[in-house]
Image (cartoon, rainbow, N blue to C red):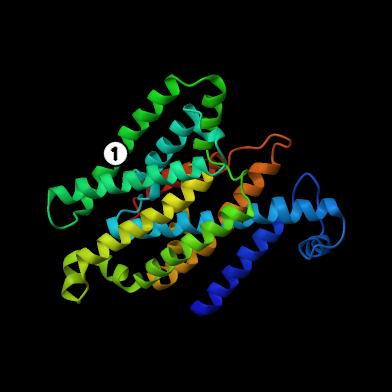
């Protein structure tokens, strides 16, 4: 099957997942009712449910899933480590610090935009710290040092989170923990639109690195011999992938394993050519998280399960299977 046809089928699957997510809920809707509601016609309650609640949430889940999957695929190529994913490099820890301190200090009451902004700022701080530590070791960006720096910075941020939660009241503690488990319940059109505008340049930059990442998979010396600017590729790939993950975490909380599972599924089915792997990861990541979020909000109605719990139930067995298999990128 040709690559454009595969990507077209995956795009249809992503649209289908969004349609299923909009259809399923406490108030089941037919596809005809959904189309009427999108057009602003029909029952007023259905219009509100579709246009104000389910559709922006499904689209935001698709964007977050795509960002995490592409980020994970990029980190796995950059570090040549099959178990690498966005959160192993400290991005989630930094975002969680920003969000948790916002909740504990009561700043989240100022407005709904405060927590995502603080989470994004924390993620950027983590990225800067990791890059500074890695750069201080030498002029070249050593991927092993990068990995170790991410783990250490992430551990430090986790200690900061525990310290903040020690002094939190019960309500702040509950809010912080729920955010750290991942949730898309606060999705709206404004946040989804801003996220889309932010992610688009990042996706384009990463897609432009597809051929250099193929060369990097052969080894840095081989890539350099074939004409790749290895250091520029590493800095650009790490920075862009980290920013994609930071934006996703800022709006959705900590959702793990998407960046681990999705790229491996693509590799197992269709191989490791990053010219196909990266766009396919975006589409499959969108499908995976939209369906996971749909399950999270419907499986235990009226209670909503954090979507990070659903992805963990899928991701942990997959992670253990990878360890037993000993598969490499």
In the displayed structure, would residue 135 be above or below residue 217?
A: above
Residue 329 visible to an observer of this rendering: no
On the image, the x and y values in percent for residue 9 come to 59, 72
| Left-right relation of 318 to 44 | left
Q: Residue at x 61, y 44 (%)?
A: 186
Q: Nearer the viewer, residue 100 or 271?
A: 100
Q: Nearer the viewer, residue 202 or 318?
A: 202
Mark 1 element type: helix
Residue 110 x/y as whole percent: 55, 36
Q: In the image, 299: left or right of 110?
A: right
**Residue 198 in the image: above or below residue 302:** below
Name the residue at 84% across, 63% down: 41
Q: Give the residue number, with chain letter if any, for mark 1.
A: 153
The x and y percentages for residue 211 are: 33, 74
Q: Is residue 60 above or below residue 108?
A: below
Residue shown at 64% from the left, 65% from the top: 15
From this viewpoint, is residue 106 visible?
yes
Where is residue 259? Give x, y as percent. 44, 53
Q: Nearer the viewer, residue 292 or 106?
A: 106
- Badge 1 crowding class, 10 Å Cα cut-off, few under 14, some 14 to 19, many 20 or more, is many
User: In what quadrant of the picture does the C terminus appear?
Assistant: bottom left
Horizontal side of residue 14 vs 151, given as left or right: right
Q: As drawn, which residue projects farthest toward the left?
A: 138
For the view shown, which residue lies furthest in the front direction?
110
């Amino acid at each position: 099957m040709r690559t454009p046809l595969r990507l077209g089928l995956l795009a249809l699957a992503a649209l289908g997942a969004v349609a299923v997510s909009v259809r399923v809920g406490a108030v089941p809707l037919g596809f005809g009712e959904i189309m009427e509601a999108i057009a602003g016609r029909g029952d007023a309650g259905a219009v509100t449910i579709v246009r104000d609640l389910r559709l922006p949430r499904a689209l935001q889940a698709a964007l977050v899933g795509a960002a995490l999957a592409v980020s994970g695929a990029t980190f796995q190529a950059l570090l040549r480590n099959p178990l690498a994913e966005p959160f192993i490099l400290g991005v989630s820890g930094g975002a969680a610090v920003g969000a948790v301190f916002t909740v504990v200090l009561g700043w989240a009451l100022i407005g709904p935009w405060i927590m995502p902004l603080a989470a994004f700022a924390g993620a950027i701080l983590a990225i800067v710290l990791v890059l500074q530590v890695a750069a201080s070791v030498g002029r070249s960006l050593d991927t092993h040092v990068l990995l170790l720096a991410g783990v250490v910075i992430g551990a430090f941020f986790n200690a900061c989170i525990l310290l903040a939660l020690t002094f939190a009241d019960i309500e702040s503690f509950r809010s912080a923990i729920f955010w750290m488990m991942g949730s898309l319940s606060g999705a709206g059109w404004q946040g989804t639109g801003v996220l889309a505008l932010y992610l688009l340049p990042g996706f384009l930059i990463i897609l432009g690195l597809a051929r250099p990442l193929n060369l990097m998979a052969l080894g840095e010396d081989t890539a350099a011999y074939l004409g790749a600017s290895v250091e520029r590729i590493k800095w650009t790939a790490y920075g862009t992938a980290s920013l994609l993950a930071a934006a996703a975490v800022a709006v959705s909380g900590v959702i793990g394993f998407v960046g681990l599972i999705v790229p491996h599924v693509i590799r197992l089915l269709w191989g490791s050519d990053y010219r196909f792997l990266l766009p396919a990861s975006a589409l499959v990541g969108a499908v995976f998280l939209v369906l996971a979020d749909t399950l999270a909000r419907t499986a235990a109605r009226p209670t909503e399960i954090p979507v990070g719990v659903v992805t963990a139930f899928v991701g942990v067995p997959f992670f253990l299977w990878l360890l037993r298999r000993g598969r490499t990128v």
